[in-house]
Image (cartoon, rainbow, N blue to C red):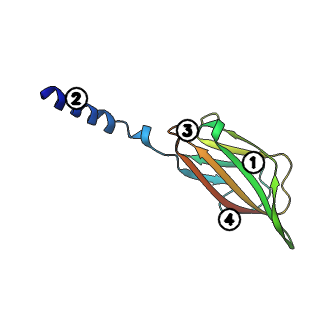
């Protein structure tokens, strides 16, 4: 009986001592910022609280309007999406300079604990 209690106690201590293993990635900052308006960014950077799995994490970009006109269908913008060297940032580099208009950033980030975080936000290029 004492052996079972000792094993149970040791298991509890081991599980409670590793909270970082159970943590999920959270979006900390983004550049350009949510609803920002300014010059065309050379890249889009999303910084997370945990390391990401490159094979399953990506950024997509869509243009949703241009000055003076709304687009009935968002236009996909070609970007090269990658995870930074430290593993905690998603970076998207547009293939061409972004034209003036409104853009939607869509991201999917899978952290090393296999938890998926998805989201969207907008910014404007003037």
Number of other residues with Cα within 10 Å of mark 1, as a class: few under 14, some 14 to 19, many 20 or more? some
Of badges 3 and 4, nearer the viewer stands 3
- Mark 1, residue position: 43
- Quarter of the image for residue 72 reads bottom right
Q: Report how far apart the C-alphas of labels 2 and 4 lie in the structure.
A: 53 Å
- Secondary structure under the numbered disc 1 in the rendered image: loop
Q: Give the mark, 3 or 4, whose residue is nearer the N terminus.
A: 4
Q: Report how far apart the C-alphas of labels 1 and 4 lie in the structure.
A: 16 Å
Q: Position of residue 31 (x, y in %)?
A: 67, 53
Q: Looking at the rendered structure, which numbered label has been put on residue 7?
A: 2
In depth, the one of 72 and 106 nearer the eye is 72
Q: Give the mark, 1 or 4, whose residue is nearer the N terminus.
A: 4
Q: Give the mark, 1 or 2, whose residue is nearer the N terminus.
A: 2
Number of other residues with Cα within 10 Å of mark 4, as a class: few under 14, some 14 to 19, many 20 or more? few
Number of other residues with Cα within 10 Å of mark 2, as a class: few under 14, some 14 to 19, many 20 or more? few
- Mark 3, residue position: 51
Q: Report how far apart the C-alphas of labels 1 and 2 lie in the structure.
A: 51 Å
In depth, the one of 62 and 45 nearer the eye is 62
Number of other residues with Cα within 10 Å of mark 3, as a class: few under 14, some 14 to 19, many 20 or more? many
Relative placement, left or right, of 13 versus 90 is left
- Secondary structure under the numbered disc 3 in the rendered image: loop
Q: Residue at x 53, y 50 (%)?
A: 26
Of badges 3 and 1, nearer the viewer stands 3
Q: Residue at x 70, y 48 (%)?
A: 59
- Secondary structure under the numbered disc 2 in the rendered image: helix
Q: Position of residue 73 (x, y in %)?
A: 81, 64
């Amino acid at each position: 009986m004492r052996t079972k209690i000792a094993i149970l106690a040791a298991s509890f201590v081991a599980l409670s001592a590793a909270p970082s293993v159970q943590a999920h990635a959270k979006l900390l900052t983004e550049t350009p910022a949510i609803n920002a308006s300014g010059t065309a960014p050379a890249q889009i950077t999303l910084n997370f609280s945990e390391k990401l799995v490159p094979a399953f994490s990506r950024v997509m970009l869509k243009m949703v309007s241009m000055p003076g006109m709304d687009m009935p269908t968002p236009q996909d913008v070609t970007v090269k999406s990658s995870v930074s060297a430290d593993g905690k940032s998603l970076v998207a580099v547009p293939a061409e300079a972004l034209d003036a208009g409104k853009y939607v950033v869509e991201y999917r980030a899978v952290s090393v604990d296999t938890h998926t975080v998805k989201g969207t936000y907008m910014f404007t290029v003037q």
